Image (cartoon, helix red, strand yellow):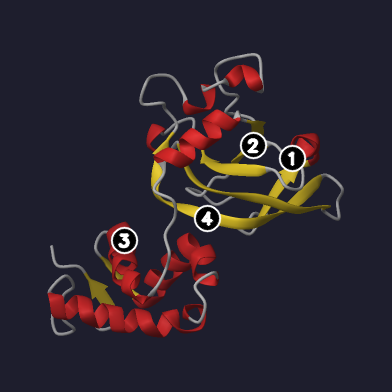
Amino acid sequence: MNYIILSQRIDIESDYKDIPFLRYHFPKRYRSQINVGDKFIYNQGNRYNKDHRYYFGYGIIGQIWMETSGDHFFAEIINGKRFSSKVQIHDPKGGYLESINYEDVREKEIPPFRSSIRPVSKAAFEKILDISEDYKIIDRSLLQNLIIEALENSSGSADIVTVCKYVWKNYEFELRASGDLLYTWQYDIRWAATNLRESGEMKSTVESPTGIWELNS
């Protein structure tokens, strides 16, 4: 068992057939760097936007199989968990978190951020987990927060379809792991919106256009 970093872009659409927290799609040149049982941390990278460089979850590598073309592989994700807050790539003490005990896994101190799959020391792995606040557990009480997050992502106003698409895109894993809520959340989220209107955090149905949910500024 090894500790690795998986690069996973979640800020843009990708040509890879990844499903975050469920499966990982990667080129065959990385096959020797990932094995069943490896523990990993997800890294969102963006060479042009420093705000989109962070760690956002972790899990264990399950089964690995070759894509039909033979040029790529898939890896099953087991026990994947999303951090409840992003972990920035920099060590609060200076340098990069992945540089902690780097000599255990590579020669150079600066992490090879362009590598989709790369080894990381156990000490660095544990430090990232220590900084994180673990992961979100989705239940009915959290749906109001997800509505607010989705509306803020849409400049404060969106229809229910847009809100639900946002929630599913960003919290599919958590919803799948939420038990019966997986089958009722699109119904429950309407009640959550009603509660937000009653508390004054969302505009009433009289104040908003038909079918539109709006935050109170």
Point out the frontmost of discs 4 and 3: 4
Q: Label 1 sits on what residue type?
A: Ile
Query: How far apart, in angstroms, are the residues tagged by discs 4 and 3?
Result: 19 Å
Q: Quadrant of residue 110?
A: top right
**Helix, strand or loop at disc 1?**
loop
**Helix, strand or loop at disc 2?**
strand
Query: How far apart, in angstroms, are the residues tagged by discs 1 and 4?
Result: 19 Å
Of pointers 2 and 4, the one earlier in the residue sequence? 2
In what quadrant of the picture does the C terminus appear?
bottom left
Q: Quadrant of residue 135?
A: bottom left
Q: Check disc 2: other Cα within 10 Å, few if <14, some if 14-19, many if 20+.
A: many
Q: Label 3 sits on what residue type?
A: Glu
Query: How far apart, in angstroms, are the residues tagged by discs 1 and 3?
Result: 34 Å
Question: What residue is pinned by disc 2?
Answer: 4
Q: Label 4 sits on what residue type?
A: Lys
Q: Which residue lies at the image location 18% right of the left edge and 73% below the top edge?
A: 202
Question: What residue is pinned by disc 4?
Answer: 81
Q: Position of residue 195 (x, y in %)?
A: 22, 80
In what quadrant of the picture does the N terminus appear?
top right
Q: Label 2 sits on what residue type?
A: Ile
Q: Which residue lies at the image location 51% right of the left edge and 78% below the top edge?
A: 182
Q: Which residue lies at the image location 86% right of the left edge and 51% below the top edge?
A: 69
